[in-house]
Image: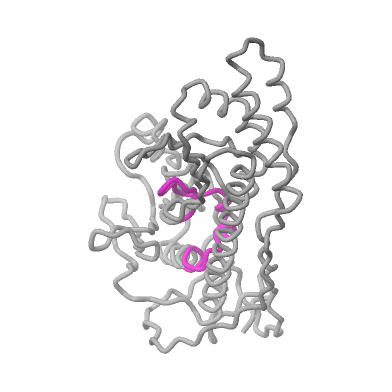
Amino acid sequence: MICNACGQQVPPGSTFCNRCGKPLPKETLPRQPARSPEPTVAGQLGRVAGTATRIFIRAGPKAWLVAAFVVIVVLVLFNVNTQQQPTTASRSAPEAEKTTEPVATVNRPTEPPPKFRVYRSKMDEGTSVVVSPVATDEQLKSLLWLFRENVRSHHFKDIGMNSPTSLQWGKKGYLSGMITVYRGEKCAGENFPDTRGAGPCGQGDHSAAYYQWGLLVDGVFQTDADSAGVNSSDGTSTEIFSYKDHWQLPASLQAELDAERKTQQEQAKVEQQTRKAFAELLESRLTASGFDISVRAREEDAQELSLGSDIFKDTATRVEFLHQVLPTWRKDLCAAGFRQVRLIRGGMFSTGDAYSIGCK
């Protein structure tokens, strides 16, 4: 059956939609699933700003070498922009992969979840959700299953989560998080550091239920490792489900998730090829202009562009590069997917120093 409210396929015999929580009518009409827009590769590199010409204003004979270096590098980047065309990969809609693993049998509640709203959400601090003060435990169980299905299928916005929940390995995303449910909003802010212990409800946990994902399993953080429970007024908690039940998404949602992951992998490859081509062309242009500078898009850190040369041993040259050259490169480097540059000063054991490009 198909839910008329959100278009999500639901298991036969269901009385409410596990995706949006809306009750199902007695009869539902078939509906074609919406096609996801094709991913786009990072936009073409823009033109480099001509601010490097200001270097010629510098006075004094000691500055001419640095100024010449800056001007030639900027001109090289202009040629890179006029000739480099990022490759876009045309991909057909990926087909759903067939799964042979059996879906775990679980006893999901049949009562629809209660209406809810996000009271507050902050990255690495959690998300607080408010329901009616008279919401029953059975309704809360259904709500926890609603959260589980939407988090597992990456439909975060469908449950009101519009901002990343975690910062891991320098990247913002939804790899882990926790949703805490409260009956009424009186205690709904108690888990945030700025109100913890000082809220209207005092010390202790006054939540009615919780759902968390991205748990540590056998020393490894796993995004699909989750658990949920309902809390009683006496302070005890009853587990509703956990990752140990080996529950899997419905086939339609799993196929959608598999297609999303495949698209992300293909796009990542194209973006890495674009960054590598950018670095190679830049190095060839610098070499042709008489500069012995190696340029490399690091595979171990896809967002870093490495530049190695003996000229960076000179402090004045490094400072001039960071304050005069790098700002003129910013638009192009950000568009290519770079977020920092590493200046290596030459030598076999030199690791250099990394500097932020300043992408927004």
Q: Is residue 173 magenta?
A: yes
Identity of the residue furthest to the left in this view? 218
The quarter in which the N terminus is drawn is bottom right
Front residue (pair 353, 37): 353
Front residue (pair 311, 81): 311
Q: Position of residue 96 (x, y in %)?
A: 56, 82
* Color style of the picture: one colour
**At 67% across and 63% down in the image, what residue appears?**
87
From the viewer's perspective, tell me whether residue 349 is left or right of residue 141. left
* Residue 194, visible in the rendered structure: yes
* Rendered image quadrant of residue 70: top right
Stretch in magenta: 149-174
Front residue (pair 332, 142): 332
Q: Is residue 150 magenta?
A: yes
**At 58% across and 47% down in the image, what residue appears?**
283
* Rendered image quadrant of residue 330: top right
In the image, residue 9 sits, relative to residue 269, either above or below, namely below
Q: Position of residue 328 (x, y in %)?
A: 67, 33
Q: Position of residue 320 (x, y in %)?
A: 57, 24
From the viewer's perspective, tell me whether residue 243 is left or right of residue 118. left
From the viewer's perspective, tell me whether residue 356 is left or right of residue 8. left
In the image, residue 90 sits, relative to residue 314, either above or below, namely below
Front residue (pair 289, 277): 289
